[in-house]
Amino acid sequence: MTNKQRAYLAGLAAKMSPVFQVGKALVTPEIVNAIDEALEKRELIKISVLKNCNETPASVAAMISERTKSTLVRVIGRKFVLYRPAKKPVIELPR
């Protein structure tokens, strides 16, 4: 993914509210499955990491990105954005 595509996706995500919150329980199989389903439907989601989480937002983002086979678009503060094209993509990335 190019920097231009990441910037485009980050711009789309700027207007979004977080869909999930990760807290003390960290990354359970249930939350990974829920995020996986959300990525299939929405392609682009924002996730918030709560203050009671023992891990850094960047490490949580990398872990979830790896487990859902998605692309980590950006980590800003305690929020991060994931992208994975659906089988029938809705979001068209710039070249």
Image (cartoon, rainbow, N blue to C red):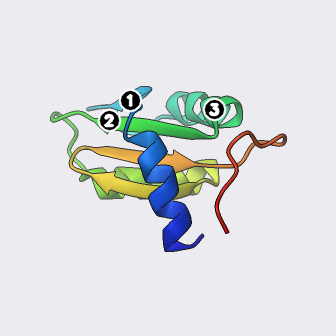
Query: Is 83 placed left or right of 51 in the picture?
Result: right
The residue located at (55%, 27%) in the rendering is 30
Q: Quadrant of the N terminus?
A: bottom right
Q: Determine the secondary structure under disc 2.
A: strand
Residue named by callout 2: 48
Marks 3 and 2: which is nearer the front? 3
Q: Determine the secondary structure under disc 3.
A: helix
Query: Residues at badges 2 and 1 in contact (C-beta under 8 Å)?
Result: yes
The residue located at (83%, 42%) in the rendering is 87
Can you name the residue that lies furthest to the front here?
94
Q: Where is residue 93 in the image (x, y as percent from the top left)?
A: 66, 57
Q: Which of 20 and 14 is in front in this view?
A: 14
Query: Residues at badges 3 and 1 in contact (C-beta under 8 Å)?
Result: no
Query: Is 38 placed left or right of 78 in the picture?
Result: right
Mark 3 neighbour class, 10 Å CA radius: few under 14, some 14 to 19, many 20 or more: some
Q: Nearer the viewer, residue 24 or 57?
A: 57
Q: Residue 42 carries which label?
A: 3
Q: What residue type is labelled 2?
A: Ser
Q: What residue type is labelled 3?
A: Arg
Query: Is 78 placed left or right of 39 in the picture?
Result: left
Q: What residue type is labelled 1?
A: Pro
Q: Determine the secondary structure under disc 1.
A: loop
Disc 3 to disc 2, C-alpha distance: 17 Å
- The earlier-in-sequence mark between 3 and 1 is 1
Residue named by callout 1: 18
The residue located at (39%, 36%) in the rendering is 47
Q: Position of residue 42 (x, y in %)?
A: 63, 32
Mark 2 neighbour class, 10 Å CA radius: few under 14, some 14 to 19, many 20 or more: many
